[in-house]
Amino acid sequence: MSFIILQTASLFTTIGIPVIVIGSLGLIFGLILAIASKLFEVQIDPRVAEIIEILPGANCGACGLAGCAGYADRIVNGGEAPNKCAPGGAATAAMIAKIMGMEAEAMEQKVAVIHCSSGGKNNTKWKYAYEGVDSCKSAVNIAGGPNSCSWGCLGLNDCLRACPFDAISLDPNGLRVIDFDKCTACGMCVAACPRKLIHLVPINRNVYVKCSSKERGPDARSVCGSAKPCIGCGICAKKCPVQCITVENNLARIDYSVCTNCGLCATVCPTKSILDLLADMRTKEEVSSEA
């Protein structure tokens, strides 16, 4: 019996004391951490959480910050303007401004526009058959990309995959099409395109140069396949009544801060590389006025 008691005491000494010591240390460290958390606690302004709830949660970075939480914190603690959330738009800006007790400046709604009409199945000339990673950023690093136009769409849909709002789709010819009703101007597709073919423009402007080629006229035609390249002729710039178009490096550019949306440039463009979304409407108005 005494032998069993001695064995039990020995076992307790071997196992029990270390367990008690470790448990005691854990309790002490836990108390220290609890006290430290109270001493060094950082008070979070409740307005940050309120603004996070209002923001769309896309974490797209259109505001220039790392996600919605970062933007909310910067608004409250850094004086950031409440109208920088493109996906949220004016309604979100107004709600944030109300929380902050301030007025929200007007937001100019924008949409993404692809300045290229190639990249499809049948309207692009190819230098070689690309069989690498299914990504524009990868393809452009191999001999400048598989398409003959060094400025044209590579057609591997990095922009489509980057869009968090499902605003980009493919038409029957494989061309990327942006749905303006879904586009929030978050800029994700702009950042995704390695050739910088996508830009954000005011939604109330409906004329776009659908080309980014800087080749001279004959060369632009030769590499674009059946697409409609800008040949840098300058007719649009000469005819523009408000001089909002300039031609640089054989490519027409529209200054939307000056453009009046008249659509004249699209009618005089010999290659039809300027798209006017209101062309049919303008034609109907002209027909009805003549009648």
Image (spheres, grey):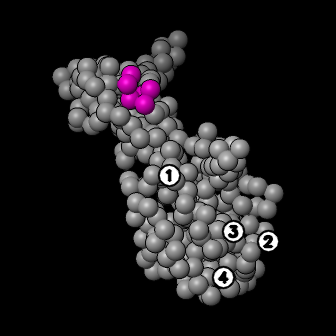
Q: Tell me, yes or no, whether the highlighted magenta stretch contains residue 94.
A: yes
Position of residue 103 relative to residue 158, above or below, is: above
- Circle 3 sits on which residue? 119
Q: What label sits on residue 221 in the rendered view? A: 4
> Which stretch appears magenta?
90-95
Instruction: Judge whether 140 appears above or below 199 on screen.
Output: below
- Which residue, given by chain and number where applicable, does mark 2 sit on? 122
| Residue in the foreground of this view, choosing between 120 and 129 | 120
Residue at x 59% of width, y 84% of height: 217
The CA span between labels 4 and 3 is: 15 Å
Q: Residues within 10 Å of mark 2 (few under 14, many from 20)?
A: few
Q: Earlier in the sequence, mark 1 or mark 3?
A: 3
The answer to whether residue 189 of the structure is visible from this angle is no
Q: Are marks 1 and 4 in contact (CB under 8 Å)?
A: no
Of label 2 and label 1, which has the lower sequence position? 2
Residue type at mark 4?
Arg
- Answer whether labels 3 and 2 touch (C-beta < 8 Å): no
Q: Earlier in the sequence, mark 2 or mark 4?
A: 2
Residue 212 lies in quadrant = bottom right
Q: Nearer the viewer, mark 1 or mark 4?
A: 1
Q: Which mark is residue 261?
A: 1
> Residue at image x 58%, y 74%?
230
Q: CA distance from mark 3 to mark 2?
A: 8 Å
Residue at the front extreme of this rendering = 291
| Of the two numbered discs 1 and 3 in the rendering, the one whose residue sits closer to the viewer | 1
- The secondary structure that dominates the magenta segment is helix
Mark 3: amino acid: Gly
